[in-house]
Image (tube, helix red, strand yellow):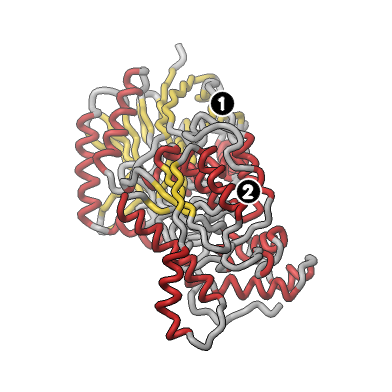
Amino acid sequence: MAERFRLTLAQLNPTVGALAENAALARDAWQQGRDAGAQMVALPEMFITGYQTQDLIQRPQFVEDVARELSALAKDCADGPALAIGGPLFEGGRLFNAYFILQAGRIAATVLKHHLPNDSVFDEKRLFSPAEVSGPYRVGPLRIGSPICEDSWFMDVAETHAETGAEILLVPNGSPYYRDKLAVRQNIMVSRVVETGLPLVYLNMVGGQDDQVFDGASFVLNPGGKLAVQMPAFQTAITHVDFAETAEGWRAEQGARVKQPDAWEADYHAMVLSLRDYMGKTGFKKVLLGLSGGIDSAIVATIASDAIGPDNVRCVMLPSEYTSPSSLEDAKDCAERLGCRYDFVPISDGRQAITNTLAPLFEGTKPDLTEENIQSRLRGLLLMALSNKFGEMLLTTGNKSEVAVGYCTIYGDMAGGFNPIKDLYKTRVFETCRWRNANHRDWMMGKQGEVIPARIIDKPPSAELRADQKDEDSLPPYPVLDAILEGLVDNDVAVGDLVEGGFDRETVKKVERLVYLSEHKRFQSAPGTRLTRRAFWLDRRYPIVNRWRDES
């Protein structure tokens, strides 16, 4: 009779530093695998610590605590399937990114990461030592090779495993989301399958960690690149995969193939999950935000409602004399549609008090941006006061277009703990609102239907800090601005190339200047969901003091 092998894939959501809690998740997955008759239960890369740990991993006591937790886990999971779990290993004076195979109460095998990513959000060459490529390990009837995450993006590690006897490849990952990344992953993994002729299991973790979101979407490929199993995106799941030995070698039997979200749904789910986990993992239960009647605060309120439920979201309208009647109506309408608490806190008295206080110093000057920023900073003060008093985390609501060019007030509307739309350009904000009005999923805790009033989506954007103000008074139209920003920020396109592509040179230079001048604001801004490969923070690290400009 042909051999069979059941592998349990645990696509789970660890928390950085929560060693005991992460180990408890591993024990539960192991028990489910044991109950299902699995010979092995697999967890993702660096699962015991959570990922990414950044410099936390350099603390010797932290690594010692991890080793103790792994030893206890091995003993607790001695009587049953093998348990594969990622974590750090300190050995010979060097620190490695490792994958541990726990069997019979001990660490039976260890795989060490060879290729260490050192681009975008990754800094592993500074934190870990590269290891020599090792061969496969045995669990029951199977010899398994485990290229760890980045190792699978190169040909050499997988080929070495195959040449030294591996019969399947199990790739543990901590692979963060960016738009359309699943297709990139699958194309690269198909290459590994074609090169080695082996089935491949791609196991990714789930969950938000600071600005990064791990999207799961684990999958199994058979030789030839045929998809045998596809797990859900952005959701925890435990899946049992059966392998059977055939005349051509081991093959994965056909299992469930969960439909994957399109780019609009994936971005939205990423924003919801990142906010939900940022709050849950830091201990916050409720949020508040300034609801202005504009589109950005409306989508943030909607994301928050979907992340933690509308009962946990406070929307605050803070009108001045420049707030239009339509904004007052739209903000209240949006809060009511969402089912969130709505508070009305005019800033007129506070603004007058500040004006009176500064009057002797401002005498002889004309009103300018200073007075506009006082309004924004007064709103920030009031919102932070509510946050302090009631323990609700303040959300900021600036989109990527505004964050890029500094169309936001430091210590004003930039005040807060998290910004779910920080990596979403304004033009995508509009489309995301339309998408959410037309779609509802079971992972959303908010209401169905048109929760964002159409009038909010359709009206010209305005900060309403002076009479008849429109964003286009100071900025190019958003379709133009976003196209230029995608060139300058996301793709490092030269100014000259953008001009050759049809953009006005003066406009491009103005945008470039604003991007560089606003670096100090972004340096002090709240973290926010990473949706692209060039999100502001770890993906794009520019100096605050920078006199260079592109004169091409």
Residue 176 in percent (x, y) is at 48, 47
The residue where tag 2 is placed is 456
Q: Residue at (46%, 36%) from the top-left corner? A: 203
Q: Earlier in the sequence, mark 1 or mark 2?
A: 1
Between 300 and 283, the one nearer to me in the picture: 300
Q: Secondary structure at mark 1?
A: loop
Q: What's the amino acid at mark 1?
A: Arg
Vertical order, 403 against 529 (above or below)? below
Between 170 and 490, the one nearer to me in the picture: 490
The residue where tag 1 is placed is 257
Vertical order, 473 against 243 (above or below)? below
Compared across the picture, whether 184 is left or right of 244 comes to right
Q: Residue at (49%, 35%) from the top-left corner? A: 446
Between 412 and 533, the one nearer to me in the picture: 412
Is residue 169 among the parts visible in the rendering? no
Q: Residue furthest bottom?
A: 364
Alpha carbon distance from label 1 to label 2: 38 Å
Q: How many marks?
A: 2
Check contact, mark 1 vs mark 2: CB within 8 A: no
